[in-house]
Amino acid sequence: MRKIMSGDEAIARGAYEAGCTVAAAYPGTPSTEILENMAQYKEIYSEWSPNEKVAVEVACGASIAGARSICAMKHVGLNVAADPMFTMAYEGVNGGLIIVTADDPGMHSSQNEQDNRYYAPHAKVAMIEPSDSQECKDFVKYAFEISEKFDTVVLFRITTRIAHSKSIVELKERCEVGVKEYKKDVKKYVMIPAHSRVKHYEVEERLARLQNYSNNCPLNRIEWGDKKIGIITSGISYQYAKEVFGDSASYLKIGMSYPLPDKMIQKFAKAVDKVYIIEENDPYLETYVKSLGIECIGKEFIPICGELNPDIIRRALLPTEEKKSYSVDVKVPSRPPVLCPGCPHRGLFFAMSKYKDIIATSDIGCYTLGMMPPLNIADTVICMGASISAGVGFKKASEKAGRDSKVFGIIGDSTFFHSGITGLIDAVYNKAPMVTVILDNRITGMTGHQENPGTGKTLMGEDAPIIDIESIVKAVGVKEENIRIVDPYKLEETQRAVDDAYKATEPFVIITKQPCALIKEVQKRRANMYCKINDEKCKKCKACLRIGCPAIAFKNGKIVIDRSMCNGCTLCQQVCKFDAIEKVGE
Amino acid sequence: MTKSILFVGVGGQGIILASKILTEGLIKFGYDVKMSEVHGMAQRGGSVTTQVRFGEKVYSPLIGVGEADVLVAFEKVEAARWISYLKEGGSLVVNDYEIYSMPVLIGQEQYPQNTLDELKSKVENLKIFSAAEVAQDLGNIKTQNIVLLGALIKALGLENLDWEGVIKDNLPEKMQEINIKAIKAGMNI
Ligand SMILES: Cc1ncc(C[n+]2csc(CCOP(=O)(O)OP(=O)(O)O)c2C)c(N)n1
């Protein structure tokens, strides 16, 4: 059967067909759909883990127990999970083990543009890079085989355009491989120094064997065309190169990008007049090719920053005429992403915006958008979990400087479970008189509504215990009198909590509780609710525009609320001093 | 010959569904197809695009400046934002629909008034209409995206293929009738 699939869907399908039995991930664009799709295959135990490190460790444990296992994360997720990966590289596997890293060139939804190909040589594990959905599926099978044959972790590297582009895939049946026997073997699975010292030699030997394989495996292949130009490329860049050069060049298409096939590269380079390296972001291939003493053209023409596309390659490497197109004389306004109408984060940010001197150490999630005007709530965003810990540092430094900074760490529920709890422990243990705001919308919002430990459901749709944030906060040692739990749709209550927090001299926590407005059941429940303007009472003072709701506009001299967008959260009604906004529906 | 179609609009307008149905149809009719969409952060009310390329054999899923055979804009200033991607002689389909962005809502930037006039004066092959009105007349404003898809199919000259069957294959039963009406209404504009 043939089906059009995204790379993410195809990876899930590949794992299914290859007999994988355990899969774990923490969501992150563009990797999220891998596990979302995995969950449809009931032969595979699939879970959302609280963070990437946990996900990799779950997969490591499952591999040691004998199961083919896979875990997936966005590029920055591998930073969180690097620790288990580096030591698992020494231990090797029992059942095959794949770690998928989904990089985001162009940063469509990311805070940096790191090129995770460097992780493979750094951790000394094999790396595989597919270039379309069919390869995503096929290469997962190869990856499991390589993992088991060479006793290695396999890093499976994709990028946004592989993950989210769709192309046609040929489906096959599942090949049931079962879960292998587990035999206790402390020299292999207990990494104390005495064992690791031995293992390091084995790792180096393994790399040599892997390189030999890389030179002779079907994952790396040469496509001969005109030999004036020889292009070495991998992943999505291969597709762009083919688009631009067609048959007017020869290609060395790399599918196994660590260890790289040295002999094959040398043979290819000898046979062509000129070598081009076409790759996105860092000169990973180029540096290696040059280290073999081969002259080549790469990053002097092809940019390191940003996403690649055929156009950039064409302009960089070929004399081309500009393509004829159109231009219009219209001043196009910018359209940045914004908090949705009815977003429960808005109430808290509006309450905070009363104070102009708050330092908001924010975090990663929908609430990062609180940084946008008119709310302007964010001074820092670093990585998931850094809101509270960076807040501690900011507070301590400010105290040393004699500044009375009011520091508010802002963190979502999923991010709190991911890596915020340790930050809060730090704040309490080291007595940082800062405020932590936990925005509990019952879901992992930004990445498209994945269950998390506070949701009460698992990835596979089963009921689950709800991990209670308030109990965690208390257990960490925040005093009861310094905790406020508020409904952010109720402005007065929320404002009171922010006022108390602002004055606090000890670690203080506000938890806002209101589910994300986009959750299906919430939408259904609120479908008939909306707010409308009473034109007679409206003084056009525009106070309601200050909450930054996309459903409210000043159009043709009037304030209007777009009924189709509004969910009746009533925040605008609560800020109106003239009773000019009415709520409809219950 | 590979054809390239660029869908542009605002997060939440149903662009992904429209492009999915197009893609499924093209596959059913025997083309090689690649489609690329953007998820995550950009979907929260930001400017979004989906790209579809089809032909005998397609390599890149991406469409460059001056390369789109058809540009379908679900919102009118988005047509102006992406117009440079339309190749000379290509077709433009524009939904006469306004969505103000946050900088416009709070008065930092202006929503331009000359978009449609400019497009009309520059682009020869263009179709501007209110898909919302068409969809409303059919009884469900949410089928705007499928009305636009119909207009796109017409612009591609693919209206004689069995799109009714494609809708039936890809939408739940209770949604089929209204969407078949919507795609036909779009083709007849
Ligand atoms: C290490 C890491 N993993 C994953 C992500 C992707 N990511 C960004 S925001 C987010 C979820 C945030 O959810 P939550 O904290 O509940 O806030 P919400 O979006 O619901 O407001 C995720 C998973 C990331 N940026 N970094």
Image (spheres, coloured by chain):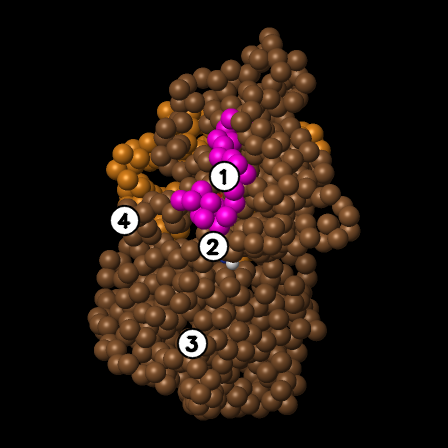
Chain colours: A brown, B orange
- Residue appearing at x 28%, y 81% in the figure: A184
State the CA–CA distance, disc 4 to disc 1.
Answer: 33 Å
Badge 3 or badge 4: first in the primary sequence? 3
Q: Please say if A46 is above or below A200.
A: above
Query: In the image, which disc is placed on residue A480?
Result: 1
Near-viewer residue (A77 or A161)? A77
Chain letter of mark 1 equals A
Chain letter of mark 3 equals A
Name of the residue lying farthest toward the top? A536
Query: In the image, which disc is placed on residue A88?
Result: 3
- Residue appearing at x 36%, y 85% in the figure: A187
- Asked whether residue B34 is in view, the answer is no
Residue A58 place in picture, x, y as percent: 36, 65
For disc 2, the marked residue is A418
Ligand 1 under 8 Å from disc 2 Cβ: yes
Near-viewer residue (B24 or B141)? B141
Identified by mark 1, the residue type is Glu
Residue A96 place in picture, x, y as percent: 33, 75
Residue A481 place in picture, x, y as percent: 52, 36
| Mark closer to the observer (3, 1) | 1
Residue A540 sits inside the magenta stretch:
no
Residue A433: which quarter of the image? top right
State the CA–CA distance, disc 4 to disc 2.
Answer: 21 Å
Badge 4 or badge 1: first in the primary sequence? 4
For disc 4, the marked residue is A462
- Residue appearing at x 59%, y 65% in the figure: A114
| Mark closer to the observer (4, 1) | 1
State the CA–CA distance, disc 3 to disc 2.
Answer: 22 Å
Q: Are marks 4 and 2 in contact (CB under 8 Å)?
A: no
